[in-house]
Amino acid sequence: MDTERVEADLDLTQPLFSEEQIQTRLAEMARQIEADYEGRDLLLVGVLKGAVMVMADLSRELDRHVEIDWMAVSSYAGTKSSGVVRILKDLDTDLDGRHVLIVEDIIDTGLTLSWLVANLKSRGPASVEIATLLRKPEALEMPVDVKYVGFDIPNAFVVGYGLDYDEKYRNLRSIGTLAEHVYS
Ligand code: 5GP
Ligand code: MG
Ligand code: MG
């Protein structure tokens, strides 16, 4: 496939992070996670669909066996948070006594994650922490404690590397801000 042509065709105003920047940062996060979870079994919980790329690359960066499970929740329609969180697909794994690390693409309002953390904590895990590649400033206003953050970003709508606009742009290797004319 002609990747360069695909990237050029996209209505991205501004590249934010290149493939290399993303991979370098994920490797740093992986080293931190390896140190923090030394001697403990780790269950990575990915939030579909946006976290697919982060999960694939972060989990393969880790120097040990981990388990991976997925949840699908809906909280977002178009470019605005709807404020409603619904489980579309639940975990297959029993969380009793497990060390859980939620893997996310982005935290915007933090609504989805604060709800998800409370939900997972009610299932008797040993611990629940969060790793997200991106975090927007608004997230700081929510009571959600994020242990691993890749990059803090400005408050703009971003796409690529798993992040979509109407299901498109997920297969970009890089992350960029979407031109406003595309979604307004
Ligand atoms: P929150 O509940 O933190 O406001 O948003 C959670 C979800 O909204 C994210 O997991 C992501 O799917 C979506 N989202 C938030 N900000 C953006 C953005 O800038 N771009 C894209 N593509 N999705 C976003
Ligand atoms: Mg997400
Ligand atoms: Mg989306």
Image (cartoon, rainbow, N blue to C red):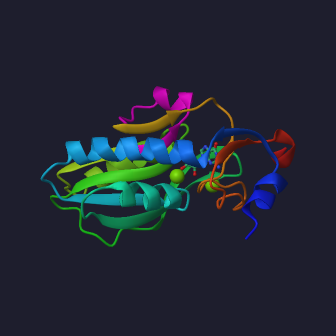
Q: Is residue 107 above or below residue 153?
A: below
Residue 113: x %, y % from top left: 44, 45
| Residue 91 visible in the snapshot | yes
In what quadrant of the picture does the C terminus appear?
A: top right
Q: From the viewer's perspective, tell me whether residue 78 is left or right of residue 25.
A: right
Residue at the image position 58 percent from the left and 32 percent from the top: 153
- Left or right side of 2 for 74: left
Image quarter for ligand 3 equals bottom right
In the image, residue 163 lies at what x, y percent? 62, 53
Q: Nearer the viewer, residue 22 or 137?
A: 22
> Magenta part of the protein: which range?
131-146
Q: Is the residue 104 above or below the residue 146 in the image?
A: below
Dividing the picture into quadrants, the one containing residue 93 is: bottom left
The residue positioned 19% from the left and 58% from the top of the image is 98
Which image quadrant: the N terminus?
bottom right
Q: Does residue 119 appear anywhere in the picture?
A: no
